[in-house]
Image (cartoon, grey):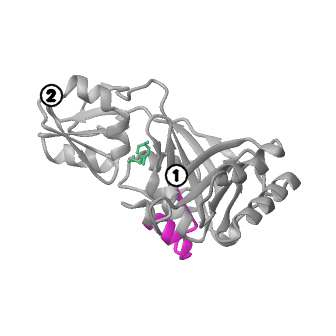
Amino acid sequence: MKALTLGPEGTYSHRAARAVADEVTFTESVTDIVERVAAGQVDRGVVPIENSIEGSVTESLDALATRDVAVVEEIVTPIRHALLAQREDFEVVASHAQALAQCRSYLEENYPHAVREAVASTARGVEQAREDPAVAGIGHPDNAGEGLRVLAEDIQDRTSNATRFVVVAPEAERSEAGGKSSLVVYPNTNYPGLLLRLLEPFAERDIDLTSVESRPSGERLGDYVFHMDIAAGLYEERTKEAVAAIEGVVEEGWVKRLGSYDTRHVLY
Ligand SMILES: O=C(O)C(=O)C[C@]1(C(=O)O)C=C[C@@H](O)C=C1
Protein backbone atom coordinates (compact mmCIF):
# COMPACT_ATOMS: atom_id res chain seq x y z
CA MET A 1 0.00 0.00 0.00
CA LYS A 2 1.27 3.48 -0.93
CA ALA A 3 0.33 6.62 0.98
CA LEU A 4 0.77 10.31 0.26
CA THR A 5 1.21 12.66 3.21
CA LEU A 6 2.54 16.02 4.33
CA GLY A 7 6.28 16.29 3.82
CA PRO A 8 9.16 16.46 3.59
CA GLU A 9 10.35 13.33 5.40
CA GLY A 10 10.18 13.51 9.22
CA THR A 11 6.80 15.19 9.74
CA TYR A 12 4.38 13.83 12.31
CA SER A 13 2.13 12.99 9.34
CA HIS A 14 4.98 10.84 7.98
CA ARG A 15 5.09 8.97 11.31
CA ALA A 16 1.34 8.37 11.17
CA ALA A 17 1.49 7.31 7.49
CA ARG A 18 4.19 4.70 8.19
CA ALA A 19 1.60 2.84 10.26
CA VAL A 20 -0.64 2.32 7.22
CA ALA A 21 1.70 2.12 4.24
CA ASP A 22 5.03 0.56 3.38
CA GLU A 23 5.74 3.28 0.83
CA VAL A 24 5.17 6.91 1.78
CA THR A 25 5.44 9.85 -0.62
CA PHE A 26 5.18 13.56 0.17
CA THR A 27 3.60 16.83 -0.84
CA GLU A 28 3.47 20.11 1.06
CA SER A 29 -0.29 20.71 1.08
CA VAL A 30 -3.06 18.71 2.75
CA THR A 31 -5.54 19.88 0.09
CA ASP A 32 -3.27 18.39 -2.56
CA ILE A 33 -3.24 15.06 -0.65
CA VAL A 34 -7.06 14.86 -0.62
CA GLU A 35 -7.28 15.98 -4.27
CA ARG A 36 -4.84 13.34 -5.46
CA VAL A 37 -6.69 10.60 -3.59
CA ALA A 38 -9.99 11.82 -5.11
CA ALA A 39 -8.39 11.72 -8.58
CA GLY A 40 -7.28 8.09 -8.03
CA GLN A 41 -3.59 8.98 -8.28
CA VAL A 42 -2.70 7.44 -4.91
CA ASP A 43 -4.13 4.56 -2.81
CA ARG A 44 -4.21 6.42 0.47
CA GLY A 45 -3.71 9.89 1.90
CA VAL A 46 -2.94 10.66 5.55
CA VAL A 47 -3.98 14.10 6.82
CA PRO A 48 -4.04 15.71 10.29
CA ILE A 49 -7.54 16.61 11.51
CA GLU A 50 -7.39 17.71 15.14
CA ASN A 51 -4.90 18.41 17.89
CA SER A 52 -5.67 18.18 21.59
CA ILE A 53 -4.14 21.62 22.33
CA GLU A 54 -4.79 23.68 19.21
CA GLY A 55 -7.95 22.11 17.80
CA SER A 56 -8.99 21.54 14.20
CA VAL A 57 -6.73 21.50 11.18
CA THR A 58 -9.18 23.55 9.16
CA GLU A 59 -7.57 23.03 5.75
CA SER A 60 -8.06 19.26 6.13
CA LEU A 61 -11.72 19.64 7.17
CA ASP A 62 -12.43 21.91 4.20
CA ALA A 63 -10.69 19.54 1.77
CA LEU A 64 -12.76 16.58 3.05
CA ALA A 65 -16.00 18.55 2.73
CA THR A 66 -15.37 19.51 -0.88
CA ARG A 67 -13.74 16.42 -2.47
CA ASP A 68 -15.24 12.97 -3.14
CA VAL A 69 -13.22 10.70 -0.87
CA ALA A 70 -13.74 8.21 1.96
CA VAL A 71 -12.25 8.11 5.45
CA VAL A 72 -11.17 4.51 6.11
CA GLU A 73 -9.16 4.75 9.34
CA GLU A 74 -8.29 7.13 12.15
CA ILE A 75 -4.82 7.34 13.67
CA VAL A 76 -4.14 8.97 17.02
CA THR A 77 -0.55 9.69 17.93
CA PRO A 78 1.21 11.59 20.74
CA ILE A 79 3.02 14.77 19.71
CA ARG A 80 6.19 15.63 21.63
CA HIS A 81 7.96 18.65 20.21
CA ALA A 82 11.65 19.47 20.44
CA LEU A 83 13.44 22.73 19.67
CA LEU A 84 16.14 22.07 17.08
CA ALA A 85 18.83 24.55 16.02
CA GLN A 86 22.52 24.84 15.22
CA ARG A 87 23.07 27.17 18.18
CA GLU A 88 21.26 28.89 21.08
CA ASP A 89 21.19 32.42 19.64
CA PHE A 90 18.71 31.91 16.80
CA GLU A 91 16.39 34.72 15.70
CA VAL A 92 13.57 32.90 13.93
CA VAL A 93 11.51 29.85 14.90
CA ALA A 94 10.13 28.16 11.78
CA SER A 95 7.50 25.44 12.07
CA HIS A 96 3.99 24.40 11.09
CA ALA A 97 1.38 26.85 12.43
CA GLN A 98 -0.12 24.06 14.55
CA ALA A 99 3.24 23.28 16.18
CA LEU A 100 3.99 26.98 16.83
CA ALA A 101 0.57 27.31 18.49
CA GLN A 102 1.05 24.13 20.56
CA CYS A 103 4.29 25.64 21.97
CA ARG A 104 3.04 29.23 22.32
CA SER A 105 3.63 29.61 26.10
CA TYR A 106 7.05 27.96 25.94
CA LEU A 107 8.19 30.31 23.16
CA GLU A 108 6.78 33.40 24.86
CA GLU A 109 8.54 32.55 28.12
CA ASN A 110 11.87 31.40 26.74
CA TYR A 111 12.32 33.18 23.41
CA PRO A 112 10.06 36.26 23.54
CA HIS A 113 12.10 38.08 20.87
CA ALA A 114 12.31 35.25 18.35
CA VAL A 115 10.21 35.79 15.21
CA ARG A 116 7.77 32.95 14.60
CA GLU A 117 7.46 31.88 10.99
CA ALA A 118 4.77 29.46 9.83
CA VAL A 119 5.98 27.04 7.15
CA ALA A 120 4.34 24.09 5.37
CA SER A 121 5.35 21.47 7.96
CA THR A 122 7.50 20.88 11.04
CA ALA A 123 10.04 19.03 8.88
CA ARG A 124 10.27 21.98 6.46
CA GLY A 125 11.12 24.24 9.44
CA VAL A 126 13.79 21.78 10.59
CA GLU A 127 15.27 21.84 7.05
CA GLN A 128 15.50 25.63 7.25
CA ALA A 129 17.25 25.36 10.63
CA ARG A 130 19.74 22.94 9.08
CA GLU A 131 20.57 25.47 6.37
CA ASP A 132 20.54 28.65 8.46
CA PRO A 133 22.09 29.13 11.94
CA ALA A 134 19.67 32.03 12.60
CA VAL A 135 16.67 29.63 12.37
CA ALA A 136 15.34 27.08 14.89
CA GLY A 137 12.78 24.42 14.02
CA ILE A 138 10.14 22.72 16.16
CA GLY A 139 9.56 19.05 15.42
CA HIS A 140 10.14 15.48 16.46
CA PRO A 141 13.59 15.18 18.14
CA ASP A 142 14.64 12.38 15.76
CA ASN A 143 14.87 15.01 13.02
CA ALA A 144 18.01 16.56 14.55
CA GLY A 145 20.34 14.24 12.61
CA GLU A 146 23.55 15.83 11.35
CA GLY A 147 24.23 19.43 12.26
CA LEU A 148 21.34 20.25 14.60
CA ARG A 149 21.25 20.28 18.38
CA VAL A 150 18.21 19.37 20.45
CA LEU A 151 18.02 22.54 22.56
CA ALA A 152 14.93 21.43 24.50
CA GLU A 153 12.48 18.52 24.51
CA ASP A 154 8.79 18.29 25.33
CA ILE A 155 8.22 22.00 24.74
CA GLN A 156 4.48 21.70 23.97
CA ASP A 157 2.34 23.72 26.38
CA ARG A 158 0.76 20.62 27.92
CA THR A 159 2.46 17.32 28.62
CA SER A 160 -0.46 15.50 27.06
CA ASN A 161 -0.47 16.43 23.36
CA ALA A 162 -2.00 14.24 20.69
CA THR A 163 -3.07 14.66 17.07
CA ARG A 164 -5.80 12.78 15.26
CA PHE A 165 -5.14 11.93 11.61
CA VAL A 166 -7.47 10.34 9.09
CA VAL A 167 -6.58 7.90 6.34
CA VAL A 168 -8.31 8.96 3.13
CA ALA A 169 -9.15 6.55 0.29
CA PRO A 170 -10.99 6.82 -3.06
CA GLU A 171 -14.76 7.20 -2.57
CA ALA A 172 -15.46 3.68 -3.90
CA GLU A 173 -13.68 2.24 -0.85
CA ARG A 174 -16.04 3.86 1.63
CA SER A 175 -17.11 1.38 4.30
CA GLU A 176 -20.13 1.17 6.59
CA ALA A 177 -18.22 -1.03 9.05
CA GLY A 178 -16.36 0.42 11.99
CA GLY A 179 -16.85 1.85 15.44
CA LYS A 180 -16.78 5.48 14.33
CA SER A 181 -18.26 7.44 11.41
CA SER A 182 -17.68 10.89 9.93
CA LEU A 183 -20.40 12.99 8.35
CA VAL A 184 -20.43 16.45 6.81
CA VAL A 185 -23.75 18.27 6.96
CA TYR A 186 -24.61 21.41 4.98
CA PRO A 187 -28.09 22.73 5.92
CA ASN A 188 -27.99 25.67 3.42
CA THR A 189 -30.46 27.47 5.69
CA ASN A 190 -30.65 28.92 9.17
CA TYR A 191 -33.36 29.34 11.79
CA PRO A 192 -33.52 29.22 15.61
CA GLY A 193 -33.00 25.64 16.80
CA LEU A 194 -31.54 24.28 13.53
CA LEU A 195 -28.37 22.92 15.15
CA LEU A 196 -30.46 21.32 17.90
CA ARG A 197 -32.53 19.55 15.23
CA LEU A 198 -29.32 18.25 13.62
CA LEU A 199 -28.03 16.82 16.90
CA GLU A 200 -31.24 15.44 18.41
CA PRO A 201 -31.41 12.39 16.09
CA PHE A 202 -28.14 11.15 17.65
CA ALA A 203 -29.14 11.91 21.27
CA GLU A 204 -32.51 10.18 20.80
CA ARG A 205 -30.74 6.99 19.68
CA ASP A 206 -28.01 7.07 22.33
CA ILE A 207 -25.31 7.73 19.73
CA ASP A 208 -22.27 9.51 21.17
CA LEU A 209 -21.19 12.56 19.19
CA THR A 210 -17.40 12.54 19.55
CA SER A 211 -16.76 15.77 17.65
CA VAL A 212 -18.73 18.59 16.06
CA GLU A 213 -17.04 21.44 14.24
CA SER A 214 -18.51 24.23 12.16
CA ARG A 215 -16.70 25.66 9.16
CA PRO A 216 -17.78 28.58 7.00
CA SER A 217 -19.52 27.35 3.86
CA GLY A 218 -17.88 30.12 1.82
CA GLU A 219 -21.28 30.94 0.32
CA ARG A 220 -22.26 33.80 2.66
CA LEU A 221 -21.38 35.15 6.11
CA GLY A 222 -22.93 33.13 8.93
CA ASP A 223 -23.56 30.07 6.72
CA TYR A 224 -21.92 26.88 7.95
CA VAL A 225 -20.91 23.33 7.09
CA PHE A 226 -20.93 20.99 10.13
CA HIS A 227 -18.41 18.17 10.55
CA MET A 228 -19.83 15.51 12.85
CA ASP A 229 -18.07 12.39 14.14
CA ILE A 230 -20.06 9.75 15.98
CA ALA A 231 -19.13 6.64 17.95
CA ALA A 232 -21.27 4.30 15.80
CA GLY A 233 -21.01 2.56 12.43
CA LEU A 234 -23.06 3.51 9.38
CA TYR A 235 -24.11 -0.15 9.17
CA GLU A 236 -26.06 0.17 12.42
CA GLU A 237 -29.81 0.59 12.21
CA ARG A 238 -29.79 3.46 14.73
CA THR A 239 -27.19 5.35 12.65
CA LYS A 240 -29.18 4.83 9.43
CA GLU A 241 -32.28 6.20 11.15
CA ALA A 242 -30.40 9.19 12.59
CA VAL A 243 -28.81 10.10 9.24
CA ALA A 244 -32.17 9.76 7.47
CA ALA A 245 -33.71 12.09 10.06
CA ILE A 246 -30.93 14.65 9.48
CA GLU A 247 -31.42 14.38 5.71
CA GLY A 248 -35.07 15.25 6.34
CA VAL A 249 -33.99 18.39 8.23
CA VAL A 250 -31.54 19.60 5.57
CA GLU A 251 -33.67 19.17 2.46
CA GLU A 252 -32.20 22.38 1.01
CA GLY A 253 -28.62 21.19 1.60
CA TRP A 254 -26.83 17.85 1.77
CA VAL A 255 -25.35 15.16 4.02
CA LYS A 256 -22.05 13.58 3.02
CA ARG A 257 -21.09 10.22 4.51
CA LEU A 258 -17.29 10.09 4.65
CA GLY A 259 -17.50 6.54 5.98
CA SER A 260 -17.08 4.29 9.00
CA TYR A 261 -13.72 3.19 10.37
CA ASP A 262 -11.78 2.14 13.45
CA THR A 263 -9.13 4.00 15.42
CA ARG A 264 -5.50 2.98 15.70
CA HIS A 265 -3.20 4.41 18.38
CA VAL A 266 0.36 4.76 17.12
CA LEU A 267 3.36 5.30 19.38
CA TYR A 268 6.74 6.01 17.93
O1 LIG B 1 4.07 19.47 10.27
C1 LIG B 1 3.92 18.28 10.59
O2 LIG B 1 4.81 17.56 11.07
C2 LIG B 1 2.59 17.67 10.40
O3 LIG B 1 2.52 16.50 10.19
C3 LIG B 1 1.39 18.57 10.52
C4 LIG B 1 0.86 18.67 11.94
C5 LIG B 1 -0.56 19.34 11.95
O4 LIG B 1 -1.02 19.84 10.93
O5 LIG B 1 -1.19 19.37 13.01
C6 LIG B 1 0.69 17.33 12.52
C7 LIG B 1 0.88 17.08 13.84
C8 LIG B 1 1.24 18.15 14.79
O6 LIG B 1 0.03 18.55 15.41
C9 LIG B 1 1.85 19.32 14.12
C10 LIG B 1 1.72 19.52 12.78
Distance from disc 2 to disc 1, alpha carbons, whole Å, reads: 32 Å
Would you name the residue on which mark 1 appears? 17
Question: x, y (%) of residue 249?
Answer: 73, 62
Question: x, y (%) of residue 114?
Answer: 16, 35
- Residue situated in front as seen by the camera: 127 or 225: 225
Mark 2: amino acid: Glu
Instruction: Please report contact status of discs 2 and 1: CB closer than 8 Å, yes or no.
Output: no
Which label belongs to residue 81? none
Answer with left or right where residue 222 lies relative to residue 211. left
Would you name the residue on which mark 2 appears? 88
Q: Is residue 63 magenta?
A: no
* Earlier residue among tags 2 and 1: 1
Image position of 22 with respect to 70: above or below: above
Question: x, y (%) of residue 188?
Answer: 59, 67
Image position of 82 with respect to 214: above or below: above
Answer with left or right where residue 200 lies relative to residue 211. right
- Residue situated in front as seen by the camera: 263 or 184: 184
Image position of 193 with respect to 189: above or below: above
Image position of 108 with respect to 174: above or below: above
Q: Is residue 200 visible?
A: yes
Cβ at disc 2 under 8 Å from ligand 1: no
Q: Secondary structure at mark 1?
A: helix
- Residue situated in front as seen by the camera: 221 or 45: 221
The boundaries of the magenta stretch are 32-46
Q: Residues within 10 Å of mark 2 (few under 14, many from 20)?
A: few
Q: Secondary structure at mark 2?
A: loop
- Residue situated in front as seen by the camera: 140 or 249: 249
Q: Is residue 232 visible?
A: no
Q: Residue at x 62, y 44 (%)?
A: 211
Q: Residue at x 85, y 54 (%)?
A: 236
Mark 1: amino acid: Ala
Q: Quadrant of the N terminus?
A: bottom right
